[in-house]
């Protein structure tokens, strides 16, 4: 019933369902936060222009209840997932009057919503009355007899909308922790439905058009002209964001992770709880590390899933987290070979043969981009498109790798009919909803702005020096040869970010929490490696570790009833897995279910 768990080191290769791809992808310009990003191939639709912003990902599986058709199925007959719960525009957040206490209002067909007023500046010492209204969205506990309080969730980013993710994955994650908990997420300050909000572009279309203007060349630190283009674009974004922030309460100065951690402390207090119960994914593990360092006595339960080292994050390096990226890419060839010719479009006699063909196509497109004139819209596929496609599909290989294999095969054979069908997943045109009334407070669909404000602000002030950056670029592309250049853009952009936060936490990211933390970690995570999880574990006394023997970003990227069981036991009873426990996934890329599931 619960899959298998064992103390092993070697991953097994087997199968996954091959679902039709119905969602749209974007070229690797900027991360896309459309509602469909978490539906069919959760990681696939998030663009690779800044990969770390992708956050929580879930595979198409029954455990986390994400089905092939892109609908969130119910965990059981009483779950609250509906079409309206997934919508980002059918609830008017501004109709909720912000309050210094949480005043719940029914929303999204069975969920509850509120806007909580909290201090904007925690360091003002009472000299400022400025506030921020934090948007909260909760799935209430169904089992009130054994009620265990509220679990807060952060899906990642930084800058992801928790209220949006609650409609996408809230019901299935809530079912995992158990029906005796309320399950709540929120839009961090400056994000989504929280106000004031940082918007550096007037409309989503304006932002999309800007993102498309980056061109079709992958960053190369040895190409001075190209490097200067990326720097100039970063300067534009920085200047626009600084101006937009000044018109909205200087919000960019108050979006640090330290402030968000303190917001969580206040949310817990307003809920009437003494201590935090929390599940953080991706950047949410950074937020968890900050909270555990700043408020160790206020932790009841904390699960960190898909861990990234907070020290590397604060140094604005973002290079330790890509240690396993190539291993995850290589797994495509292993699983493809195991699936056989009927299970994988790129099947060949050995994994190495598949790998050779794969990279031969990339090299060919690098030098000769491929025209797809019959696509709608017409498209020229570039090397940058393919690197972005590979990078982001590595976040959720179960759903993403069949698409990658089909695309590479179509390019290899020159199959224009198939390429035309696959093209919308490589480049979706910007649609203008000029004739439709905008919702009162739309959630940003492609908001790269908030990521800069949080991540660049959390780091020490960065300056650009060509020689130093060249060395950094060489190192990250050595660690992650295929996609390292995508990740290197982040550090470059932070050198041009002009806004400094009023408050940064600069103390040690370490501590002794009141209750031990549980880390749950894929063994091969392209953006939060086991290496980082082990480093973080050392710093927080008593931290437990559950390894999931899978590939992908965060454990929901590969369903495992074994993992779900341990997570629930931890939240309900505070118990830890035995040291060395490894959970096997129940679904693997290309060929289907394993472990009798």
Image (cartoon, helix red, strand yellow):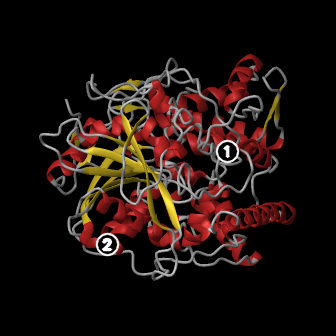
Residue 138 location, quadrant? top left
Q: Which residue is mark 1?
A: 387
Which mark is nearer the camera, 2 or 1?
A: 2
Question: Is residue 42 shown above or below 554?
Answer: above
Question: Is residue 540 shown above or below 124?
Answer: above
- Residue drawn at the location 45% of the way across and 68% of the way down: 310
Q: Position of residue 14 (x, y in %)?
A: 38, 30
Q: Position of residue 502 (x, y in %)?
A: 56, 77
Circle 2 crowding by C-alpha within 10 Å: few under 14, some 14–19, many from 20: some
**Which quadrant holds the N terminus?**
top left
Residue 221 visible in the current orientation: no
State the residue in front, 320 or 269: 269
- Residue drawn at the location 78% of the way across and 40% of the way down: 382
Q: Position of residue 521 (x, y in %)?
A: 35, 52
**Which quadrant holds the C terminus?**
top left
Residue 36 location, quadrant? top right
State the residue in front, 194 or 212: 194
Residue 444 visible in the current orientation: yes
Give the SS element for disc 2. loop
State the residue in front, 249 or 213: 249
In the rendering, which numbered label is found on residue 295? 2
- Residue drawn at the location 67% of the way across and 45% of the way down: 387
- Residue drawn at the location 35% of the way across and 74% of the way down: 294
Question: Is residue 220 shown above or below 497?
Answer: above
Image position of 277 (left or right of 526)? left
Give the SS element for disc 1. helix
């Amino acid at each position: 019933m619960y899959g298998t768990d064992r103390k092993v080191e070697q991953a097994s290769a087997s199968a996954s369902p091959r679902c039709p791809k119905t969602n749209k992808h974007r070229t690797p310009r900027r991360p896309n936060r459309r509602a469909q990003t978490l539906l069919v191939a959760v990681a696939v639709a998030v663009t690779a222009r800044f990969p770390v912003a992708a956050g929580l990902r879930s595979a198409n599986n029954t455990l986390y209840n994400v089905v092939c058709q892109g609908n969130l199925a119910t965990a059981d007959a009483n779950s609250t997932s509906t079409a309206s719960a997934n919508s980002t525009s059918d609830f008017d957040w501004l109709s909720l009057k912000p309050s210094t206490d949480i005043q719940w209002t029914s929303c999204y067909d069975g969920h509850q919503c509120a806007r909580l007023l909290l201090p904007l500046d925690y360091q003002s010492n009472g000299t400022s009355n400025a506030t921020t209204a934090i948007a909260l969205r909760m799935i209430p506990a169904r089992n009130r007899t054994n009620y265990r309080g509220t679990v807060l969730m952060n899906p990642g980013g930084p800058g992801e909308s928790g209220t949006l993710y609650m409609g996408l994955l809230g019901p299935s994650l809530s079912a995992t922790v158990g029906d005796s908990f309320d399950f709540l997420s929120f839009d961090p300050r400056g994000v989504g439905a929280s106000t004031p909000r940082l918007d550096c572009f007037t409309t989503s279309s304006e932002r999309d058009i800007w993102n498309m203007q980056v061109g079709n060349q992958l960053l190369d630190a040895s190409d001075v002209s190209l490097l200067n283009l990326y720097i100039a674009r970063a300067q534009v974004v920085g200047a626009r964001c600084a101006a937009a922030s000044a018109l909205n309460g200087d919000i960019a100065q108050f979006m640090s992770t330290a402030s968000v951690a303190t917001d969580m402390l206040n949310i817990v207090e307003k809920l009437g709880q003494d201590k935090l119960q929390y599940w953080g994914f991706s950047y949410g593990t950074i937020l968890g590390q900050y909270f555990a360092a700043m408020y160790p006595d206020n932790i009841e339960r904390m699960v960190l899933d898909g861990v990234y080292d907070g020290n590397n994050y604060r140094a604005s390096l973002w290079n330790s987290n890509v240690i396993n990226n190539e291993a995850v890419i290589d797994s495509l060839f292993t699983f493809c070979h195991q699936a056989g010719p009927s299970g994988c479009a790129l099947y060949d006699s050995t994994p190495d043969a598949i790998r050779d063909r794969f990279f031969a196509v990339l090299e060919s497109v690098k030098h000769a981009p491929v025209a797809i004139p019959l696509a709608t819209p017409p498209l020229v596929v570039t090397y940058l498109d393919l690197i972005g496609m590979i990078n982001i599909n590595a976040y959720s290989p179960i759903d993403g790798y069949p698409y990658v294999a089909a695309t590479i095969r179509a390019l290899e054979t020159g199959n224009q009919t198939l390429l035309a069908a696959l093209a919308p997943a490589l480049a979706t045109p910007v649609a203008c909803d000029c004739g439709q009334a905008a919702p009162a407070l739309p959630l940003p669909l492609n908001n790269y702005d908030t990521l800069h404000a949080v991540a660049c602000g959390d780091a020490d002030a960065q300056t650009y020096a060509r020689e130093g950056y060249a060395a950094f670029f060489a190192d990250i592309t050595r660690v992650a040869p295929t996609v390292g250049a995508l990740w290197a853009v982040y550090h470059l952009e932070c050198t041009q970010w002009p806004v400094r936060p009023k408050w940064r936490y600069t103390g040690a990211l370490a501590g002794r929490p009141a209750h031990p933390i549980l880390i749950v970690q894929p063994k091969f995570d392209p953006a939060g490696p086991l290496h980082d999880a082990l480093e973080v574990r050392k710093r927080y006394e008593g931290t437990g570790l559950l390894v999931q023997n899978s590939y992908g970003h965060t454990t929901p990227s590969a369903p495992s009833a074994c993992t779900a069981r341990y997570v629930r036991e931890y939240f309900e009873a505070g118990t830890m897995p035995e040291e060395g426990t490894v959970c096997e996934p129940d679904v693997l890329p290309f060929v289907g279910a394993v472990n009798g599931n």
